Each structure stands twice: as C-alpha cells, then as structure tokens.
C-alpha cells in the first residue's frame, strides 16, 4: 500500500504545471459543454410540458385558487366555481386598490355568489406570496384539495411554491391557455420563446431554493445522529 502511494506521488510530481493546467482546462470545457446540453434539454422538456398541458376532464376539489396575472385566469376560476367544481374561490394577488365590486362587474359574476363564495387576497406580490396567501386561506378553512388556476407557462413554478407551502394538500392543476401567445409554435415566435425561457429560469431558481433547505436539514439530521452516537 505504501509503495503504491509513493508511486502515485512520484507520478503527480512528474506532471508539469502546463500539463496539469491543460487537464483542468479540458475538464472545465467538458463540464461546461455537458452542463449547457443538460440546461438546453431541460428547457425543451419544460416547453413541451407547458405546451402540451390539457385541462383535466372532471376537476373537483374542496376549493379553488386563481393566481392573478390576467382576466382569463379569474374568469376560468369563476366558471369552475359556478359549475360546482369547488366550494369556495380565492383570487390571490389582487391589487389593494381594486374593489370587489370592480371584479364582480368585470367578470359579470352573480352578486350573491361573489358575496358568499369568493375571497380576495391582497397581500401577495409574487408567486411565492401567492402560495403563502393560499396556504393561510386553505388552513383557515381546513381544505384538503385545491384546484390551481393560472396560465400554462406559470403552472410548473406555481406548483413548486404551493407544494412547499401546502405539502399535504392535493393540487389539481387547471392551466389557462392564451391563444395570442402561440404556445404550440413558441419556437417560431421570439416573444413567446423569451417568455418561456424567462419562466424556465424562474422555475429552476424556485426548485433550487426549496431543495437547498431540504438538503441542509437532512445533513443536519445526519450530523445530529452522528453526534448522538
């Protein structure tokens, strides 16, 4: 064993600095190429998932949450509520100056239904904020399942945030399509491609942000076990 170690040390010492630098450079280039390919493949998969998303055939849940960002999202959520797909609706991320009466008139919702079964969340300023706002509302009412209404491109990141805030609540994704975005042929439309790529980056950040604490807590638990021993 000692002889092998000495031979290895001699071999390392025999390497010239230029050779070592070349090896490091080749390794860095290879890692960059592989990383870029994986990143690009991930984007293609992300775009495919977004563009191939379909409405669930028979969505039902205890309640419904609409993440604001467009009139279509709110309209779809209200239609689901009217059809009895959920008992109550939260519209999350409503501007503080927007009145309930304004939304009721804009969506042409029955006034009695709006008053009894629709809540407005006004504190969320981001997707993470939407998740926190929805979590507080769900826990307040004791719901166990939730129909999530948002745009198709926004759905993956929304589910990441909601899974973090509500890990034990079943989510039914209801993606809203926007015909003007041309999602099915996004690669032919620079604006849509840019939108998808930007959302892909945000999705990666959200996934990484929520995986890091989980990994850290696992490591701490292991360290605690070692210390206890």
Image (cartoon, rainbow, N blue to C red):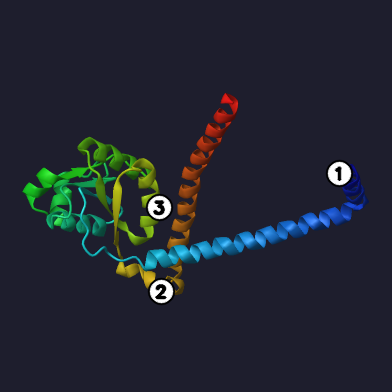
Query: How far apart are the two marked residues, 2 and 3, measured between alpha carbons?
Result: 21 Å
Residue matched to label 2? 185
Question: Going from the N terminus, do you reach mark 2 or mark 3 first?
Answer: 3
Horizontally, is 209 left or right of 163 in the view?
A: right
> Which residue is nearer to you in this view: 11 or 49?
11
Q: Which quarter of the figure has residue 72?
A: bottom left
The local crowd at label 2, few if under 14, some if 14 to 19, many if 20 or more residues have their Cα within 10 Å, is: few
Judged from the image, the secondary structure of the residue bearing numbered disc 2 is: helix
Horizontally, is 178 left or right of 35 in the view?
A: left
Query: How far apart are the two marked residues, 3 and 1, measured between alpha carbons?
Result: 52 Å
The local crowd at label 3, few if under 14, some if 14 to 19, many if 20 or more residues have their Cα within 10 Å, is: many
- Which mark is drawn over residue 1? 1
Question: Going from the N terminus, do you reach mark 2 or mark 1 first?
Answer: 1
**Rendered residue at 87%/56% (across/down):** 19
Query: How far apart are the two marked residues, 2 and 1, measured between alpha carbons?
Result: 62 Å
Q: Is residue 156 above or below residue 162?
A: below
Task: Report if residue 99 is visible in the image.
Answer: no
Q: Is residue 86 above or below residue 122?
A: below
**Rendered residue at 32%/59% (across/down):** 151
Expressed as whole percent of the image width and height from the top left, the position of residue 57 reads 23, 65
Pointers 3 and 1 in contact (C-beta within 8 Å):
no
Residue matched to label 3? 157
Task: Report if residue 214 is visible in the image.
Answer: yes
């Amino acid at each position: 064993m000692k002889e092998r170690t000495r031979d290895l040390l001699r071999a390392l010492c025999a390497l010239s600095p230029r050779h070592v630098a070349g090896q490091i450079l080749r390794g860095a280039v290879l890692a960059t190429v592989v990383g870029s390919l994986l990143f690009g493949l991930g984007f293609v998969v992300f775009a495919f998932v977004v563009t191939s998303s379909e409405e669930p055939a028979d969505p039902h849940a205890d309640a419904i949450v609409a993440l604001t960002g467009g009139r279509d999202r709110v309209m779809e959520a209200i239609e689901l509520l009217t059809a009895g797909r959920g008992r109550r609706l939260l519209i999350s991320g409503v501007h503080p100056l927007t009145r309930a009466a304004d939304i009721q008139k804009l969506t042409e919702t029955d006034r009695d239904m709006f008053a009894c079964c629709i809540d407005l969340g006004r504190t969320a300023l981001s997707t993470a904020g939407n998740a926190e706002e929805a979590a507080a509302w769900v826990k307040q009412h004791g719901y166990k399942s939730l129909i999530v209404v948002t745009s198709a491109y926004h759905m993956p990141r929304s589910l990441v945030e909601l899974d973090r805030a509500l890990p034990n609540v079943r989510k039914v994704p209801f993606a809203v399509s926007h015909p003007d975005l041309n999602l099915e042929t996004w690669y032919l439309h620079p604006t849509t491609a840019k939108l998808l790529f930007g959302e892909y980056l945000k999705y990666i950040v959200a996934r990484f942000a929520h995986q890091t604490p989980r990994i850290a807590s696992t490591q701490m638990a292991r360290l605690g076990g070692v210390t206890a021993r």
